[in-house]
Image: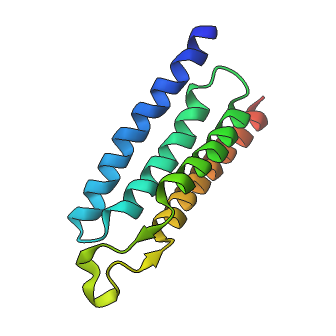
């Protein structure tokens, strides 16, 4: 069981990188600003992977990842500014959009985890 706790961090970090990259590529492919899509996807996957990979106290682990990830997101994304491609919408103006999208992804991940957790408890 100790090994599974040690594997939690690389699993979550790997999921963060893959989901963030794919989210960034997907939003850029549809012509939107890539940063909010990357943050949303990464936060969603980090919370869900923490729940799935934790050997015990799964719900608490997912919640802790949400809180820690929220702090890291604040540190990385504040302040954010609209990119140059948003000339008609205020390029280089400050915005909270990437941070809000990241938080929404994490909260959606927590909601999915809560649904699974309640389903499992009801089955026992």
Quarter location, residue 84: bottom left
* Colour scheme of the rendered structure: rainbow
Residue at the image point whose x is 78% and y is 37% from the top: 122
Q: Total number of numbered labels?
A: 0
* Residue most extreme to the bottom: 88
Residue drawn at the location 54% of the way across and 53% of the way down: 75
> Residue 15 at x, y = what percent?
42, 36
Residue 30 visible, this angle: yes
Q: Is residue 1 visible?
A: no
Residue 92: percent from the left, percent from the top? 35, 78
Q: Is 58 rendered above or below residue 86?
A: above
Out of 46 and 71, give the one closest to the viewer. Answer: 71
Question: Where is residue 76 drawn, in percent x and y?
Answer: 48, 53
x and y percentages locating residue 27 in the rendered image: 30, 63
Quarter occupied by the N terminus: top right
Quadrant that contains the C terminus? top right
Q: Residue furthest top?
A: 2
In the figure, is residue 50 to the left or right of 114? left
Residue 37 as seen in the image, left or right of residue 121: left
Q: Residue at x 46, y 24 (%)?
A: 10
Q: Which residue is drawn at the image coordinates 26% and 85% (left, top)?
A: 87
Q: Taking 123 as reference, is 106 above or below it? A: below
């Amino acid at each position: 069981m100790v090994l599974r706790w040690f594997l939690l961090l690389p699993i979550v970090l790997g999921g963060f990188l893959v989901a963030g990259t794919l989210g960034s590529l997907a939003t850029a492919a549809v012509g939107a600003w890539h940063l909010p899509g990357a943050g949303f996807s990464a936060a969603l996957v980090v919370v869900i992977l923490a729940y799935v990979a934790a050997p015990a106290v799964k719900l608490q682990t997912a919640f802790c990842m949400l809180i820690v990830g929220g702090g890291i997101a604040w540190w990385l994304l504040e302040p954010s500014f609209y990119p140059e491609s948003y000339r008609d919408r205020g390029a280089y103006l400050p915005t909270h959009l990437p941070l809000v999208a990241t938080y929404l992804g994490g909260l959606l991940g927590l909601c999915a985890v809560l649904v699974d957790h309640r389903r499992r408890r009801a089955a026992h």
